[in-house]
Amino acid sequence: MRAGASRPARPSFFPLVASGAAAGALAFVAIALIEIVRRGGGELPLLWPARDASQFAIAGAVLGALIGSLRRSRRLSSLSPFGLALGGGIGFGMGLDRVVTGPLEGGRALELAVFGAAVALVGAVFGQIIGRLLARVRPIAPRPARDLGIVAALAIPALWPLPSPPSESPPSERNVLLLTIDTLRADRLGFAGCPRGVSPYLDRLARTGTVEIRAITPLPRTLPALASILTGCHPPTHGVRDNFHYRLDAEAITLPERLRAAGWTTAAVNSNPVLSHDCGIYQGFESANDRGNDWSRLGILRGLGRLRTLIAMRSGNRARVIADLAVDWLRRRDPDRPHFLWTHWLAPHMPYEPAFPFDRVWDRGYDGEYARRFDYGTVSKGTMTYRNPLSPRVREHVKALYDGEIASADRALGRLLRAMERAGDLENTIVLFTSDHGESLDEHRYFFNHGDFVYGPATNVPLIWSGFEPKATGTLRNRPVSLVDCLPAVLAAAMGEANLPDVDGRWPVPGDRALHGESGFCRFPHLNDRLGWLLPRPVAQNPDLVEDWQRDWEAQAIRAKQRFVEVDGWKLVRSPDPEGDRHELFDLGTDPGERVDVAEANPERVRELAAVLDRWLEAAERGPGTASARVIDEATRERMNSLGYLGD
């Protein structure tokens, strides 16, 4: 440098920080706008796009300010806050999406975390290159007043307070709370006569309303059963015949769609991976939160929420985490509109892993095999289900763990109800509690599973209506109720509208009606010696990997389903067989557990009920069956496999 010459003046620290903050905020807003345009008005639209984009802007401003402060160093003066924030943000979002959709089990957690960091780093590098090119084309000098004004303008929507919860004047319409606990047998609950005391909060809820002591599910698998609750239709009508292959089609009109059209705000909180966002069950919900993955939020915010929820579920009480997600939505909802909230807990679905202290309460002192946790880690699901190798003592311990899972879910449900009660929100709310299906613990030589058969342990479900009838407190009703009746019952109580022509359910239920249902698809044809027409083992155990499944295998799979009809205290179960279908008959008045087949002693009753079942099947198979094909991605497949839904 020549004598007397001086170095160009460098911007001071504050302008660099302000300039970086503005650049980072604009970069993150650009990412948000890209997703908003891409999402458009899809099945699950964004709930607060402006607020979410503003939160992006604040995060980007913090990151940009940090990068701007580093530019004070001559070695780092070429850093581009806009480019680094843009590229790094996009890469971080892609990596986060992979992290939160993959299973965080064992070494996979570290593997996915490294992948996420690598993608974010690559994005930042490319962003730096783009940012430097843009700076050469059009350099922008720091101007603190302008830059801080940009940050402030972009941050306003996020800082604007959400509506406060209702207090003095709740909406005139009644709120609707749908509570479902997966895999829950009615006969393990206190209000149904079980003396073990596992369900104090459900027992309390039962004392405030009406209990149906003989409610049934039309199909003992999660997705079809919940589709029946939300559409009021049997599986042949809505078309979802099992957890795989099918997604509820947009043509189906669901309960949240009907309520939302009438002014209700709608939300769902779920903890079962079968109910991922590709299954179609969430149509009509403004907010749908799948274990922290809330698709009403923008990508990175959704991913961070999912990651936070996964960490909480792995380190604590999973059922309580789901309750807290529901409470969080209640605090943020629009107080001027009635709300419909559906919350679904996975427990007591396998694996049986109750939260402390319920992992030991009902079998104190046990320290043998499967102490405190029961899964398919050492024995395959098929073998455990059909050829159960456990000793009678271990089986009793497993049942105690099942009860512990119920207790965990019951306390979480109570946590949600208490929060609503404290907010004064429960008085104006009708509550419907039920389950998608039960669980066979050892009945009919079918252990710790559900879905392949339609015997009572899997098809009988608890059902409580609270707030539907003003004077009903602890009322027990023995009437033929199916999960398809939930939709018309809710619409009658909330809107005075029931018995719609496009649903199968009815309210009030006819006292002389017949109840019908069918099983899911059997996954263990090599072990199941009670059903005919079963699929080949590779097709049955890996249904999502079979090409042209609906063309080549669907008709046979449906033919192989077990069916039932229940009329006037009698239940007929039909098991398909190429040599002639076999029938079992149960007298529910003397044998509510369906353990003694009396078909041989009652041939006329068998013929009568078989004719009723034939008429239903003929009409049902002529139904619209509007479900569309479902393609299960690898992440969902891995999560389903971890719960025993796939494989051997």
Image (cartoon, grey):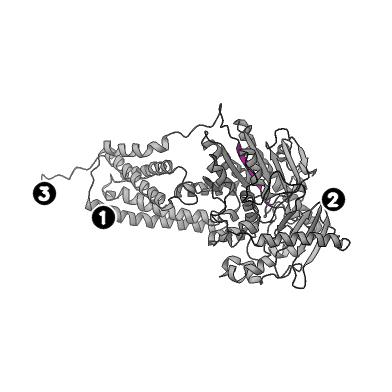
Image quadrant for the C terminus? bottom right
Report how far apart the C-alphas of labels 2 and 1 lie in the structure. Answer: 81 Å
Circle 2 sits in a helix, a strand or a loop, which is it? loop
- Residues in magenta, as a range: 175-184
What residue occupies the far front of the structure in this picture?
A: 501
Q: Tell me how far mark 2 sits from mark 3, CA to CA.
A: 107 Å
In this rendered view, identify the residue nearer to me: 357 or 426.
426
Dot 3 lies on which element?
loop
Does the magenta portion include 182? yes
Q: Residue at x 23, y 41 (%)?
A: 11
Residue 605 included in the magenta stretch of the image: no
Circle 1 residue: 133
Quadrant of residue 640 within the rendered picture: bottom right
Query: Mark 2 highlights which residue?
Result: 589
Label 1 – label 3 distance at C-alpha: 31 Å
* Residue lying at 59% horizontally and 31% vertically, measured from the top left: 423
The residue beneath circle 3 is 2
| Disc 1 residue crowd, few under 14, some 14–19, many 20+, Cα 10 Å | some
Amino acid tagged 3: Arg
In primary-sequence order, the first of circles 1 and 3 is 3
Q: Secondary structure at mark 1?
A: helix
Q: Which secondary structure is most common in the magenta stretch?
A: strand
Horizontal side of 126 relative to 631 (left or right) equals left
